[in-house]
Image (tube, grey):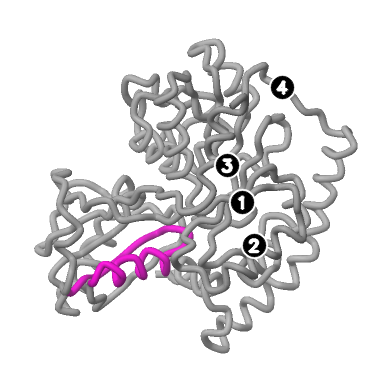
Amino acid sequence: MAIKFVHQTARKVMDNPAANPRIKALARGLGYLSPISEALVRLRLFCYRTNICRTFRLGRRVISVGNITVGGTGKTPLVAYLTALFKERGKAVVILSRGYRRKGKGVEVISNGKGLLTSREKSGDEAYFLARLSGGVPIVVGKNRVRAGELAIERFDPDVILLDDGFQYLPLEREVDLVVIDSSNPFGTGRILPGGILREPLSSLKRADIFCLSRTDQAQDLDRLRALLRSINPEAPIFECIHSPSFLRRIPGGEKVDVRLLRGRRLFAFSAIGNPMAFERTLTDLGARLVGVRSYIDHYSYTTADIKEIAQQAKGSGAEFIVTTAKDMVRLPGGYHPCIEVFALEIRIEITRGADIIESIINPEA
């Protein structure tokens, strides 16, 4: 119970720190730590900027796809999207991932481009999900992305290396620093962790070469966001995308089902992602009626007891279906089948503005 309280409290602080007096007090307490965190971040940035800390080149074209906030901005599906475009042009691609919260150690090839070579637990759920999205592309995981890149070159001799979640990984030099910003919640309260969702000060966006604004269909004030980015980094071009629902995947079994199934139906939604409200809004935009929701802290590993509890809540709320995200699907335990049908919503990246900028990434010599 204590662990669940911590998970839910952390989520409430991120989503709405003024929800009630207790949450507001906790948010205020965390906020006092933000200046200390910011000072440490600035010191680290200074060390790399002045070459006190060493950086490395891999001798291949490296493209980093990252963000400046914690939580889901949409960088993982964008990495998969770019991977597919490079493959269409006949380029050999390797993805480097940290393998966040993985149980394996060191640097490891989790996919050789022909299939997965290890479990989700040893890969990390983010890298494992990326391997599902980017079939046919080698993926190397490890905290030391320089060593991971060296191994990737040794094993696969790629033309291009995509560095997943690489904006803060300063030891590795890159040709393109692409920063993804979630238009539905760009910077939270504007404070650095732990009092906010920023990993670095907004001034760090000066390092970006290109901005991607994701979920622009859920933006509050897109013009203001564009203006802010141009004021920080006027040289970086901006392209925009939405996360378009692609299909439903039945759990278990994996059968593909048309998303129109959800129209007018009563749903119970659950997720453990960085921006659960964006997921829930997508479901309502599909015409579904949300009769209950449950959100967990990002990257939460579900237990069978969690799924039983979700099923009970869904049944009690009168839900016809239970829906989660494709990211959550890979973290679900096997062996338990709720009495209500369960689906995962698969999404795809759809570029809505700045397709020429994407082309400049894929083919810089054009």
In the image, 195: left or right of 283? right
Q: Verify whether residue 271 appears in magenta.
A: yes
Which numbered tag is attached to residue 357?
3
In the image, 203: left or right of 219? right
Question: Which sits earlier in the primary sequence, circle 2 or circle 1?
Answer: 2
Task: Locate residue 188, reporting x and y percent.
Answer: 61, 69
Question: Which sits earlier in the primary sequence, circle 3 or circle 4?
Answer: 4
Disc count in the image?
Answer: 4
Q: Is mark 3 in CB contact (under 8 Å) with mark 2?
A: no
Badge 3 density bin: few <14, some 14–19, many ≥20, Cα 10 Å: some
Q: Amino acid at mark 4?
A: Arg
SS for dot 3: helix
Q: Is mark 3 in CB contact (under 8 Å) with mark 1?
A: yes
Q: Amino acid at mark 1?
A: Ile
Badge 4 density bin: few <14, some 14–19, many ≥20, Cα 10 Å: some
The magenta span reads: 266-287
Question: Which sits earlier in the primary sequence, circle 3 or circle 1?
Answer: 1
Write down the residue under mark 2.
226
Q: Nearer the viewer, mark 3 or mark 4?
A: 3
Q: Amino acid at mark 3?
A: Ile
User: Residue 259, relative to residue 117: is it above or below?
Assistant: below
Q: Quadrant of the C terminus?
A: top right
SS for dot 4: loop
Judging depth in this view, the residue of 117 and 321 nearest the camera is 321
